[in-house]
Image (cartoon, rainbow, N blue to C red):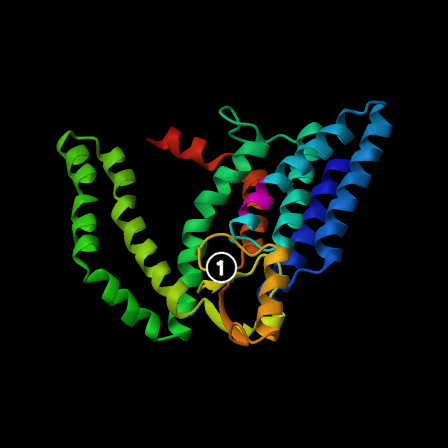
Amino acid sequence: MLVEAVIFLSLLFLAAASVFDIKSGEIPEASSVGHLAVVLCLAALASFMARSLNPLLFCAMLSAAYFIVGYIFFALGQWGGGDVKVIAAVGGSLALVSELGYPFNSMHLFPPTVAYFLNMGFISIPYVALYGLTLGLAHRQVFDRFVVFLKKTENILLFVLSWLPVAAAYIMHLRAIAAVYALLPAFLLLTLYLKAVEVEALRKKIPTKSLVEGDVLVDAFTVGNVTLGGNGIEGLSKEDASRLKKWATEGKIPAHVTVKWGIKFVPIFLLAYAVTLLYGNLLERILLLL
């Protein structure tokens, strides 16, 4: 009964966080920290019922591990602060569900807490493709930029080379392997398309005074011997954001800057959680089919 409660409440919290993320890009503390608090309380209850600290300790340890992974993505400018809190709650939930004996499918290669990230990878590809297509339809210049990327000599060469493993596997009558290798040219096209989306649809100009920790600047700004932003990956630290605001107030940099914003990832967290519970490790299932 307790394991069902953990799953139901986690799905409920993740669904709510997904709706908020899609609608506003902001995830309320009640949907992230609240989720983690509920999971830890249920873990404490499980420990009390089992007369063992294992459920609570395992839940807390996996929440911390997932938080660290999320924070790395946050530091790289790929996720927002809300994403980090949500993924920490997911880690705790999966740990508790596993500790309570949930019968996961296809979990011989990796534990559920590791398989979850593999499932995220598989789910991300169609999700990001659909997300990018939607943004492309809303911003027609995305397709023009995509064509420009396709016409570049180096990209044409990479596309041709990406078919060589497919041809080699097919010649050796390894058709199942050839089908897997066929994902390479598709992945290359998707990467180029998403780059076009990032350039044309995932950038916006905001007042410099509105900068916050984690924002990723498109351009670098140099005052004296200090250069901030423009690295394309890492988000701003709190100190960097404060310094840029001060520079803008002093007239040393523009009053408005261009930042990159990312794809809404919380729905992927929800889908990966549901898939992990229903189907187990997708990689393991795919390998069994080959």
Q: Judge whether residue 132 is colored magenta.
A: no
Query: Who's the residue at 66% across and 30% down the image?
Result: 98
Q: Is residue 107 left or right of residue 173?
A: right
Rendered location of residue 94, percent (x, y): 65, 37
- Local SS, label 1: loop
Query: Who's the residue at 38% across and 70% down the image?
Result: 200
Most foreground residue, 273 or 21? 21
Rendered location of residue 251, percent (x, y): 56, 76
Q: Judge whether residue 70 is colored magenta.
A: yes
Say above or below: 14 vs 108.
Answer: below
Q: Is residue 211 left or right of residue 28?
A: left
Which amino acid does the dot numbered 1 rest on?
A: Gly
- Pointer 1 local density, CA inside 10 Å: few below 14, some 14–19, many at least 20: many
Most foreground residue, 250 or 109? 250
Is residue 228 at all visible to an observer of this figure? no
Q: Main secondary structure of the magenta part?
A: helix
Is residue 289 at all visible to an observer of this figure? yes
Q: Which residue is mark 1?
A: 229
Query: Who's the residue at 67% across and 49% down the image?
Result: 85
Rendered location of residue 248, percent (x, y): 57, 73
Most foreground residue, 280 or 264? 264
Rendered location of residue 199, percent (x, y): 38, 66
Q: Is residue 108 left or right of residue 249?
A: left
Which span of residues is magenta-colored?
69-73
Say above or below: 15 vs 88.
Answer: below
